[in-house]
Image (tube, grey):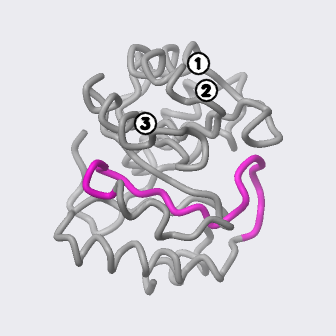
Amino acid sequence: MSTSKTEFLVAPSILSADFSRLAEEIAAITEAGADWVHVDVMDGHFVPNLTIGAPVVKSLKPVSKLPLDCHLMIEHPEKYVEDFAKAGASTITIHVEATSDPGGLLNRIRELGCKPGITLKPGTDAKTIFPFLPLVDLVLVMTVNPGFSGQSFMKEQAAKISLVREELKRIGHTALIEVDGGITAETAKLVREA
């Protein structure tokens, strides 16, 4: 997965797309300059909403020139990472709260040929993921409570972005930081400053 030479990447979520026109929606975000396609996967258990699974990711792969960034908001993600890898995910991000062995699962994601990412819910202490930072290519900071689109950015989460950035710098790791939820022109500035 290549990244652009800009300081920030743009990864629009298909959760906001018209699902009857996904190929057209992906073409539109590609033409608009998106770097990745963010795929929110929800199971109705870990979070209260239900979205898509690996078959939809598989159908997106042939119509997307962009990397597919799969954010698994699901219980027991260890049961499904292989399906998402086979479907064409470029990055697979798991929630630290969703599995009993985050480190083992992150290693498994890499073994499957995908870039591993880790995230946590807004109420979880950022330090919870620090032991796993050396294993990841991506840290996703949730700035809304996971499960629904259209929520407002939680400004207090900007401090968590700073904590993660400082810890990555301290350990000399170059993992990307992705910020998910409520991003607007105004909140993008807060994220950039964090």
Depth check: 28 or 150 in front? Answer: 150
Query: What secondary structure is found at the residue carrying circle 2?
Result: helix
**Nearer mark to the viewer, of 2 and 3:** 3
Count of labels shown? 3
Would you say the magenta stretch is mainly helix, strand or loop?
A: loop
Q: Earlier in the sequence, mark 2 or mark 3?
A: 2
Which dot marks residue 92?
A: 3
Which quadrant of the figure has residue 157? Answer: bottom right
The magenta segment is 133-152
Which quadrant of the figure has residue 114? Answer: top left
Residue type, mark 1 in image: Val
26, above or below 13, in the image: above
Residue ranking furthest to the right = 48
Q: Earlier in the sequence, mark 1 or mark 2?
A: 2
Q: What is the distance, in whole Å, between disc 2 and disc 3 at their CAs? A: 20 Å
**Nearer mark to the viewer, of 1 and 3:** 3
Residue type, mark 2 in image: Leu
Mark 1 and 2 residues: CB-CB less than 8 Å, in contact?
yes
145 inside magenta stretch = yes
Residue 50 x, y percent position in the rendering = 77, 31
Q: What residue would you read off at disc 2?
A: 22
**Circle 1: is it few (<14), some (14-19), or many (20+) Cα within 10 Å?**
some
